[in-house]
Amino acid sequence: MIGTPPATDRPFVHANCAISLDGRLAYAGGRRARLSGPADLARVQRLRAASDAILVGANTVVQDDPSLRIHAELLEKPVDTRLTRVVFDSTGRIPESARFLDGSLPTIVVMTEGAGRQFPAHVTVVRAGTGRVDPVVALDALAGQGIHKLLVEGGGQLFASLFRLRLVDRLTVYIAPVLIGGSTAPTMIAGVESDGPDQIVGLQRESVEPLDDGILLTFRPRPIAPGGAAPL
Ligand SMILES: NC(=O)c1ccc[n+]([C@@H]2O[C@H](COP(=O)([O-])OP(=O)(O)OC[C@H]3O[C@@H](n4cnc5c(N)ncnc54)[C@H](OP(=O)(O)O)[C@@H]3O)[C@@H](O)[C@H]2O)c1
């Protein structure tokens, strides 16, 4: 279940994804991989139902065209949650035809200050940063929209930004028993290179559970040491 909000005003941020055993989020070139089994799919629906909003990066909307809704048929009990969909889309490049924009759920597009894209009236546009969406400013703004429990579902670039800025409060990863391989299949964390131990993001294991034919891992961030980087 998603946790209680952190001490700051920003939302509690729960990152969740499914990966192959070799850490890939998708097939070569970013083609969507369906890695979860039935129990994991149901778990994700429960997570969604316990969240105020789901956030994804613009590439995930462009490449996967996800609905980001709660699939109630996978839940044991009906829920009356009205989940908000959120995308970080600096320039407003997600296609008009995306299911994300179908108006069936409250929808927020976070763009940069100068982005001029117009969206349909049902879409709330939030401005955060210049050049690329500033996650710190964006999360503050989402809290201002009443979002206190935020589920982040990828992809790897968005995860990288949030982990680097130490904005993730919990991570759940379903590891499917498959190997994707190659050099273009996206990994769970993209973004800047780590060329040594100072750049890695340290996590603490909370639990390890068998699920479907794979494994569900839960982590929380390691606390930041006084005056420096997170201890490893
Ligand atoms: N297996 C899973 O659980 C799962 C879940 C989700 C996605 N995926 C896969 O992941 C792949 C997409 O991942 P991805 O890494 O290419 O892209 P992504 O993280 O979905 O989106 C990245 C894009 O978001 C926008 N963005 C805006 N502000 C950002 C910020 N501060 N930090 C990072 N991104 C920001 C950027 O585009 P602009 O500069 O244009 O704003 C950036 O290129 C797809 O292949 C999809 O199938 C898998």
Image (cartoon, helix red, strand yellow):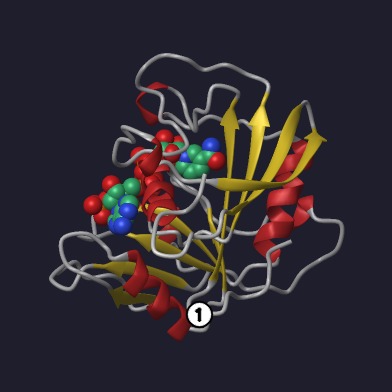
Residue 63 in view of the camera: no
Label 1's element?
loop
Which residue appears farthest toward the front when viewing the image?
A: 226
Left or right: where 71 falls relative to 88: right
In the image, residue 199 lies at what x, y percent? 36, 42
In the image, residue 141 lies at what x, y percent? 38, 79
Residue 157, quarter of the rendered image: top left
| Rendered residue at 44%/49% (across/down) | 159
| Rendered residue at 77%/53% (across/down) | 73
189 up-or-down from 180: above or below: below
18 up-or-down from 46: above or below: above
Residue 107 in view of the camera: yes
Residue 108, quarter of the rendered image: bottom left
Residue 136, quarter of the rendered image: bottom left
> In this view of the protein, which residue sits in the foreground, 55 or 15?
15
Residue under label 1: 8
Which residue appears farthest toward the right when viewing the image?
A: 76
183 up-or-down from 78: above or below: above
> In this view of the protein, which residue sits in the foreground, 17 or 37?
17
| Rendered residue at 79%/31% (across/down) | 212
Q: Residues within 10 Å of mark 1 (few under 14, many from 20)?
A: few
In the image, residue 218 lies at what x, y percent? 68, 47
Determine whether the beta carbon of the residue marked 1 sits less than 8 angstroms from the nearest atom of ligand 1: no
Left or right: where 110 falls relative to 231: left
Q: Amino acid at mark 1?
A: Thr
| Rendered residue at 55%/59% (across/down) | 223
How many numbered dots are placed on residues in this image? 1
> In this view of the protein, which residue sits in the foreground, 230 or 2?
230
Left or right: where 1 falls relative to 172: right
Q: Check the picture and name the quadrant holding the N terminus.
A: bottom right
